[in-house]
Image: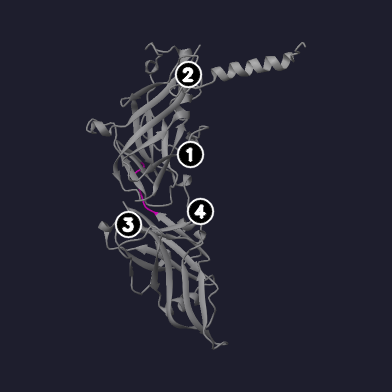
C-alpha cells in the first residue's frame, strides 16, 4: 500500500523541528540563540562622570493635593510642615459632658535622639482647601491655650493611637466662631522633630469624640466623627542649587542631576576590538545600572525608597542650575529602582536611557533622579560623590551589560 504524505504538513513539521533544535538559549547568552556565539559583555567604570549636582524643584512641580493618605507635621533642616484637620456637624448650643478626646493614629516619628517630640495646636482663622494649604500663613494661625501633647518614644509599625485631651470650651468657642466647623492646625515644638499620622483617605483619619447635651434634648448624645477634610502645609526656604552634593530630599523636593560620558571606546567586541559607529548603534544594551552608595541616610526605617530616572532634554547645563519640568523626559521602559533602608547602596536602572544614548535616539544631556514620594514625608538621603576623598569602595559607578550585533 502506497503511503501518501501531505506535502504542506510535512514541510511545516520539518520547519518546527529545525526551530526547536536552534532556539535553546544558552544561560550565559542573553540574546536568545546558541548559533551566533556572541555572549553579553560587561563593562564597569567609576570615572565617567562629567557633571553632577543637587537642586531644589520649582514650587510649580510639586503640590500637596489634599488626597494624601498620611499627614505630616514637624520640621527638618529649616523645612516645616503643619497638619490641618477639620470636624463638621458639631451641633449648636450644646453643653459638653466629660472629656473630649482627639485620636490620631501615628505611623512614624522622628528618631528618639531628637526627643522630646511635643505637639502644639492652633486655631485656623481662615477658610482653607485641602489642595491649597499654602495660602494659609502663620498669621492665620492662633495658638490655643491648653497643654501641649508629648508623643510616646516609639511608634509601632502598624501605628499607635494617640489620645489627646481637648478642653470642652475650646470646641464650643471655636465652633461658634466658624461657619464650617472645628478647625485645628498641628505643629511640633522643637526643631528637627516630626510626626506622621493617618489621613482621612486612609479610612482611619483623626477622630474626635465627646458626649454632649443640647438645649432641646436633655439626654446625653455622643459625637464621634472623623475629619471632614485634612491636609498639610509645607513652608521653608532651601538653596536652589547645591554643587558637589548628591542628595535626594522630599521636602522641599531636592533632585539629583548626573551626567556621565559614554565614550566610543567603551564598547568592544568579543575580540576586544572597539565597535564601529554602526555597530554601536545596532548593539543591544541588556542592562545598565548607576550604582550609588548612601553617605548620610536619614530615610525612614523599615520602608522602601523608590527613585526614578528622567532623561534631560536641555543641552545648556554647563553650570549647575534648576532643571524645570519641561526639560525632563520619561523614556519608555524606564522603571523605578527600589532601595531598602537597611542597604547602603541603590542600583538605578538606566537601561532604556543608555540604549537611547548608544543607538543615537537620545542626546546625552544627563539624567535627573527624583524620589516618587516628593512632598509626602521628611525622607532624605545623601550619596557619596565621585570626589577624590570618597572611599574606593563607596565610589559611584556605572555597570553596562551589552551584546554586540551578530552581523
Q: How far across and how far down the image is residue 137, in percent? A: 42, 60
Residue where numbered disc 4 is placed:
65
Residue where numbered disc 3 is placed:
110
**Do callouts 2 and 3 mark residues in contact (Cβ within 8 Å)?**
no
**Do callouts 1 and 2 mark residues in contact (Cβ within 8 Å)?**
no
**Do callouts 1 and 4 mark residues in contact (Cβ within 8 Å)?**
no
Look at the image and say whether residue 273 sits in the magenta stretch: no
Q: Is residue 405 above or below residue 398?
A: above
Disc 1 packing (10 Å; few <14; some 14–19; many ≥20)? few
Q: How far across and how far down the image is residue 323, in percent? A: 43, 37
Q: Secondary structure at mark 2?
A: loop
Q: Secondary structure at mark 1?
A: helix
Q: How far across and how far down the image is residue 224, in percent? A: 51, 74
Sequence-wise first label, 2 or 3? 3
Q: Which residue is at a point 27% across and 61% down the rendered structure image?
A: 115
Mark 3 vs mark 1: in front: 3
| Label 4 – label 3 distance at C-alpha | 24 Å
Residue where numbered disc 1 is placed:
325
Q: Which residue is at a point 39% across and 22% down the rendered structure image?
A: 262
| Label 1 – label 2 distance at C-alpha | 31 Å
Disc 2 packing (10 Å; few <14; some 14–19; many ≥20)? some
The disc label shown at residue 377, or none: none
Viewer-proximal residue among 194 and 60: 194
Disc 3 packing (10 Å; few <14; some 14–19; many ≥20)? many
Residue where numbered disc 2 is placed:
283
Residue furthest toward the right?
Answer: 1
Amino acid at each position: 500500500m502506497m503511503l501518501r504524505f501531505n506535502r504542506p504538513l510535512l514541510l511545516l513539521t520539518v520547519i518546527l523541528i529545525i526551530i526547536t533544535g536552534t532556539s535553546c538559549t544558552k544561560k550565559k547568552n542573553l540574546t536568545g540563540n546558541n548559533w551566533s556565539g556572541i555572549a553579553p559583555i560587561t563593562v564597569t567604570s567609576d570615572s565617567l562622570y562629567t557633571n553632577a549636582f543637587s537642586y531644589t524643584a520649582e514650587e510649580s512641580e510639586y503640590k500637596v493635593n489634599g488626597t494624601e493618605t498620611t499627614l505630616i507635621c514637624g520640621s527638618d533642616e529649616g523645612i516645616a510642615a503643619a497638619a490641618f484637620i477639620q470636624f463638621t456637624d458639631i451641633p449648636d448650643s450644646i453643653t459638653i459632658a466629660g472629656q473630649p478626646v482627639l485620636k490620631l493614629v501615628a505611623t512614624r516619628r522622628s528618631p528618639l535622639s531628637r526627643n522630646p517630640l511635643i505637639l502644639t495646636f492652633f486655631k485656623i482663622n481662615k477658610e482653607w482647601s485641602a489642595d491649597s494649604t499654602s495660602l494659609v500663613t502663620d498669621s492665620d494661625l492662633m495658638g490655643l491655650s491648653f497643654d501641649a501633647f508629648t508623643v510616646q518614644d516609639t511608634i509601632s509599625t502598624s501605628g499607635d493611637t494617640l489620645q489627646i485631651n481637648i478642653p470642652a470650651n475650646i470646641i464650643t468657642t471655636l465652633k461658634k466662631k466658624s461657619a464650617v466647623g472645628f478647625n485645628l492646625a498641628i505643629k511640633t515644638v522643637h526643631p528637627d522633630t516630626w510626626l506622621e499620622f493617618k489621613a482621612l483617605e486612609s479610612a482611619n483619619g483623626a477622630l474626635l469624640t465627646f458626649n454632649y447635651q443640647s438645649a432641646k434634648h436633655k439626654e446625653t448624645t455622643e459625637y464621634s466623627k472623623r475629619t471632614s477634610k485634612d491636609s498639610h502645609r509645607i513652608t521653608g526656604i532651601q538653596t536652589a542649587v547645591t554643587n558637589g552634593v548628591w542628595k535626594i530630599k522630599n521636602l522641599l523636593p531636592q533632585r539629583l542631576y548626573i551626567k556621565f560620558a559614554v565614550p566610543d571606546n567603551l564598547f568592544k567586541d568579543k575580540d576586544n576590538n572597539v565597535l564601529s559607529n554602526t555597530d554601536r548603534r545596532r548593539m543591544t544594551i541588556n542592562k545598565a545600572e548607576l550604582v550609588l552608595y548612601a553617605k548620610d541616610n536619614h530615610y525612614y526605617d523599615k520602608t522602601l525608597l523608590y527613585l526614578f530616572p528622567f532623561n534631560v532634554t536641555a543641552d545648556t547645563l554647563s553650570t549647575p542650575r534648576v532643571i524645570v519640568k519641561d526639560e525632563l523626559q520619561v523614556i519608555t521602559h524606564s522603571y523605578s529602582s527600589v532601595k531598602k533602608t537597611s542597604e547602603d547602596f541603590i542600583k538605578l536602572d538606566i537601561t532604556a536611557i543608555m540604549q537611547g544614548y548608544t543607538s543615537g535616539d537620545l542626546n546625552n544631556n544627563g539624567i535627573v533622579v527624583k524620589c516618587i514620594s516628593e512632598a509626602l514625608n521628611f525622607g532624605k538621603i545623601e550619596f557619596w560623590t565621585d570626589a577624590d576623598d570618597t572611599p574606593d569602595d563607596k565610589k559611584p559607578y556605572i555597570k553596562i551589560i551589552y551584546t554586540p550585533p551578530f552581523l
